[in-house]
Image (cartoon, coloured by chain):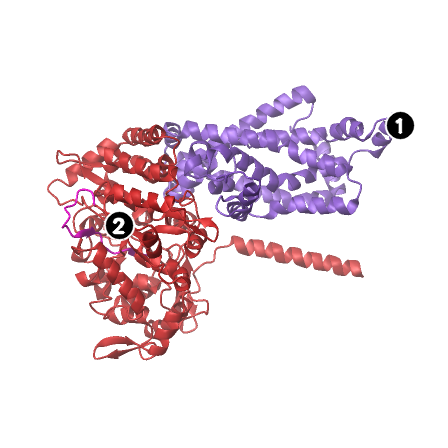
Chain colours: A purple, B red
Amino acid sequence: MIKSRKESRRWIKRVWQHKMFYFFMLPGLIWFFIFSYVPLYGIQVAFRDYTFSGGFTGSPWAGLKYFQQFFNYYQSGDIIRNTVVISLLKLLIGFPMPIILALLLNEVRKIRFKKTIQTLSYLPYFVSWIVVVTLMQRLLTPYGGPVNELLGAFGADPIQFLNNPTWFYQIIVGSEIWKNIGWNSIIFMAAIAGIDQQLYEAAKIDGAGRYRQMWHVTLPGIRNVAIILFILAVGNLMSAGYEQLLLLNGPATASIGSVLDVHAINSGIREGRLSYAAAVGLFQSVIGLILILTVNRIARKISDVSLF
Amino acid sequence: MTKIWHKGAAALIATVLLGGLLAGCTGSGSDNRQDGDSYKLKVLHNWNGSTGSDQGITPIEEVIREKTGITIEWEYTKGSEAEKVNTIFATQDLPDIYTGPAWGGELDGIIKAANEGQLVDISDKLANYPNLQKSIAKENVPPALYEKAFDAFDGKQYLLLQNQPATNEDGMDWLYGFYVRKDIAEAVGVDPQSVVTKDDFYQFLRKIKDANLQENGQPVFPLGGFSNGWAVGIGNTMFFGSNYVDRGDGNLEHVFFRQEYEEYTLFYRKLIEEGLLDPEVFTQTDPIAKEKINQGRIAVLAAHYPAILDASKEYVTANPGSDYIPLGPLDRAGAAPDRPVDLAIQGNNVTAITKNCQGECVDKALELLDFLASDEGFLLTRYGVEGVHWEMVDGTPKPVQEWFDKFAEDASGKERKNVGIGIGLESLTGLDRINSAAGGDIWADQKRTEAMENARAILRPNGIQVISAYNPGDVITKSPDWEMLKPSLDRTGDAWTEAVFAKSDEAALRILNDLRDQMKKTGYDNAMEYVNENLKGKEVVTLQMPN
């Protein structure tokens, strides 16, 4: 008892000593509390027959009715498959890209050039999907779009890039990478900046060139950050990106482009089936949690790096 | 010293941002309804794309304020109306008065809201508001709609209906159809009126395609439409008469299960496959659709005629002789050649007072709605302020020339909106009596009226008849299986477009069959049994053209 009181005093003292750091954390914690923990209270809607008058707590209980409805829905299998396929493609192709960009930028010695490239690569992140998709429609249309004009100049036939199953995955993954590569590279740039410069000097003394320094110093230096981000990214495997898919999926690509996020939003907002939408959303989250726990465990076993 | 200033400025910015965040989190509230001498009411005009004046309160609204003591604060919808209905009730961000479409998911959402105590029951107050009472009298509402939305709450009354024609002469026929550019029809040497059958239609589009027409270096699409595919699908009337078809034994079934529906789907699939239908039509936005029309890149347009006249105005002015003129009239499945065109001309708008408005607010809202539904309100909202924008000459409204010219010259419609015409007030004016009580639209320009009359003469050689029969689509929503069936039935439109883009005819039919199975699994048979049971001995809609 005395020991634990002592410990808690020590803990408070320690916190007080670093109060400024904790103070900086405060907005983030408040944000998480308001936007990630408070809404958890709404999860119960998935188990209730939501009514406007009853709200979250007054609507009658419905048990697993809406989960059953989802699994009995004739396209639920296709929708889950599409979500996983698109997410996996984004993860496998999209995840290494910011690392590669960070590594390349790290090798650039002209500071002004480096800063310009960094700024240009960050910009798309701040452009909303609706603008990106409108631009893509204009650029990629086979009827006077500059991309097809260019292809035409080389004698190629015009290509219907959008609403075309042949080009669907390339467009989805490509636009995702283009939009996020710069922003996602920031954390790797920061990790690279934190690598002890003496390691590079030691490598140089041992005769390592730029490529070997990158391979033996930089990459191991950002390994832990990469693993943690990978674990978090796997948690999003059941979420393929709502806005992007809502805007880029068309009737011709529906069989491979209908995903859980869009299905949940359409059911909830367009059709007014809020409990059903909550059930679909909860299903996504639970699978995401299971994936995170699994990958975290695997990562801990094989690399000693894990989230918790 | 500089550091202190920096710190101070940073603290100030942080405070402002945090304050803004917190202010954003709080509801707007409707407690402060007094606006000077007038009472403020928030009206949600739930029609996608509707807008108001960009110059504050309009002269028409000023007259309304003088007459009723009420100031209207508008909210307009941008996006899906059905989504808006669901969102306002789910988030409880409610207006005082809701007004929006009297059909589809929007109406279902409003009925759900009524059943769940979100709307104000006005049954005990209606007697004091004769104009409102008249607008929802049984004889003024189509029977199935009456049962579904007005006589549906155990004597309570939540909804008002607007814009249903007061007399036959007030019925608005929007002249939906396929319209071809006159110069293109001449270029391919086809008389638009000779296109009558499905095959004629296909061959006509083929001829346009084969002519390899170009505009500004871009190919001309034989067939196109507006945003999200509106309304290229109206060729369905060549395949079936209405959404519910007699199976031959006196019982109805949904046309989605019929062979005709498959033929309709495969016909459109052929149009896509052969490049006769703009492949972007189902995914394009409104600006892109209108840009194509303005560039002269659509040969045949499917929509209602007013939309086509508006969208093509610029191109036609720059290229005389390129007007869109009606094709056909095309064959109507199941209709005798001399049969008048069957149109559902019913109120297009429902209005309700939400629970956000209580006590005095309800009386104020009803006063406002009753005034707008009066003849005086009707003329004010359609024509503007008497003595300023129009005058009564021998009992007939006549436009003031200066305003007529202003409105005619303004293609954007902004001049009208700044007066208060077309800002949503017209949705609240009770029965439509534009011809019977208001002498016809005084702002309609001569050319447009002539074009409409010409199209009417071609497309309605036997006139029209207003549908008064029961619509099974309204009855099925009362079936006990409706909640389960609705999500599947709502998917028929999406499944159709997906089938149209399928890789093969077999794949297209597979898409239809998969949804048919799902509909069966979610209670379709029981729901249809309910419909057939309830419609026994009643006249049912079996032929209906879009309107």
Q: CA–CA distance between discs 1 and 2?
A: 82 Å
User: Left or right: where does residue B341 sit relative to residue A169?
Assistant: left
| Disc number lying in front (1 or 2) | 2
Residue sitting nearer the eye, B416 or B87: B416
**Category of crowding for the residue at label 2, using alpha-carbon neighbours closer than 10 angstroms: few (below 14), some (14–19), many (at least 20):** many
In which quadrant of the rendered view does residue B200 lie?
Answer: top left
Q: Are marks 1 and 2 on the same chain?
A: no
In which quadrant of the rendered view does residue A171 lie?
Answer: top right
Whether residue A286 is visible, yes or no, is no
Q: Is residue B351 magenta?
A: yes
Residue B210's tag is none
- Quarter that holds the N terminus of chain B: bottom right
Helix, strand or loop for disc 1: helix
Q: Which residue is mark 2?
A: B546
Count of labels in the image: 2
The magenta stretch is B332-352
Report x, y in % for residue B335. 16, 45
The answer to whether marks 1 and 2 mark residues whose Cβ atoms lie closer than 8 Å is no
Report x, y in % for residue A100. 69, 33
Dominant secondary-structure state across the stretch colored magenta: loop
Report x, y in % for residue B529. 19, 34
Q: Which residue is mark 1?
A: A205
Above or below residue B277? Residue B499 is above
Above or below residue A95? Residue B313 is below
User: Left or right: where does residue B273 sit relative to residue A35?
Assistant: left
Of all residues, the one furthest to the left in this rendering is B537
Q: Is residue A119 magenta?
A: no
Of all residues, the one furthest to the right in this rendering is A205
